[in-house]
């Protein structure tokens, strides 16, 4: 298990009974931590030394989860910027959005290249959300212009549709998939939305909820599927 936030990064190898702190640096971005299919974790954090993206190689159920093994990646975050979001696709490619750029690594974080020209004229990624589809072949970006962008060719080109909050004015906080075509989005002030057609159309699904701002959504692995929304 991994837990992260303002208090740093913790790892548990005994199902949450005991925890080991491997970083004291506060996490940044959404979600702040991602894991690839090999189990390696990538952690975005900020300290007095600035913004960093770290990688820890998977260590299984061993005591080798240590701060000394949490090493900086090759991402150089421009001065004055922070990491907004990140995700990993099926090929292990890592996508990272900062305030004014979006980067891709094809070698596990050793080096990164900017791909922001492929999504132009969009050039500001503050409070954005990056997620991969259930089969990890499509990457989605919920941007601050209230549109949902997607790429099926590893960021070479992007297409877009109006996001769920386009007619409302709030931002998307998170996206979670029920299936390849059905997914839900939580927003900063307009509740929860659902699409049944991969984002072409959206319906607001907030009946019974108290408040309109939700940080995230989880779809439980159950039959029928249960959906849990976390209120901010």
Image: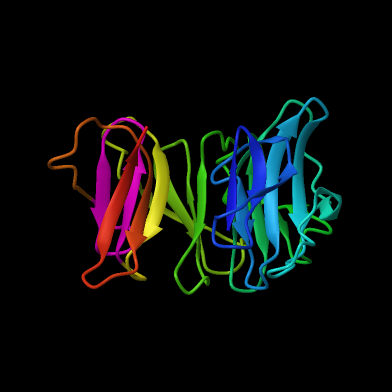
Q: Which residues are magenta?
A: 182-202
Figure disc tally = 0
Query: In what quadrant of the picture does the C terminus appear?
Result: top left
Asked if residue 70 is positioned above or below residue 211 in the image, the reply reads below
| Residue 192 within the magenta-colored segment of the rendering | yes
Closer to us: 114 or 53: 53
Location of residue 119 in the rendering, given as x and y in whole percent from the top left corner:
58, 50
Q: Residue at x 86, y 51 (%)?
A: 68
Q: Position of residue 85 (x, y in %)?
A: 58, 45
State the residue lying farthest toward the front.
17
Which of 186/59 is in front? 59
Q: What is the residue that sits farthest to the left in this orientation?
A: 208
| Residue 167 placement, left or right of 159 | left
Residue 110 in view (yes/no): yes
Residue closest to the eye, 163 or 135: 135
Residue at coordinates 83% horizontally, 57% vertically from top-left? 111
Vertical placement of 200 versus 166: above or below?
below
| Front-lying residue, 23 or 30 | 23
x%, y% of residue 58?
73, 67
Quadrant of image for the N terminus: bottom right
Residue 50 image position (x, y, % from top left): 79, 30
Q: Is residue 162 above or below residue 58?
A: above
Q: Residue at x 44, y 36 (%)?
A: 145
Residue 201 visible in the current orientation: no
């Amino acid at each position: 298990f991994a837990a992260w936030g303002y208090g740093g990064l913790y790892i548990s190898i005994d199902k949450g009974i005991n925890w080991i702190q491997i970083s004291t640096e506060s996490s940044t971005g959404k979600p702040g931590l991602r894991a690839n299919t090999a189990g390696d974790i990538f952690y975005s954090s900020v300290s007095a030394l600035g913004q960093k993206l770290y990688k820890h190689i998977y260590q299984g159920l061993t005591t080798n989860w240590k701060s000394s093994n949490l090493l900086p990646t090759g991402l150089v975050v421009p001065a004055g910027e922070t990491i907004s979001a990140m995700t990993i696709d099926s090929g292990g490619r890592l996508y990272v959005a900062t305030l004014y750029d979006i980067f891709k690594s094809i070698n596990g974080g050793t080096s990164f290249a900017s791909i922001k020209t492929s999504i132009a004229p969009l050039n500001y990624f503050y409070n954005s959300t990056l997620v991969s589809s259930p089969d990890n072949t499509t990457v989605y970006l919920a941007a601050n212009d209230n549109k949902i962008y997607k790429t099926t060719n590893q960021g070479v080109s992007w297409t877009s549709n109006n996001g769920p909050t386009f007619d409302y004015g709030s931002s998307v906080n998170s996206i979670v998939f029920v299936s390849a075509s059905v997914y839900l989005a939580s927003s900063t002030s307009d509740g929860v939305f659902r699409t049944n057609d991969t984002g072409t159309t959206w319906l607001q699904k907030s009946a019974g909820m108290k408040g309109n701002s939700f940080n995230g959504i989880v779809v439980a692995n159950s039959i029928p599927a249960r959906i849990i929304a976390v209120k901010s």
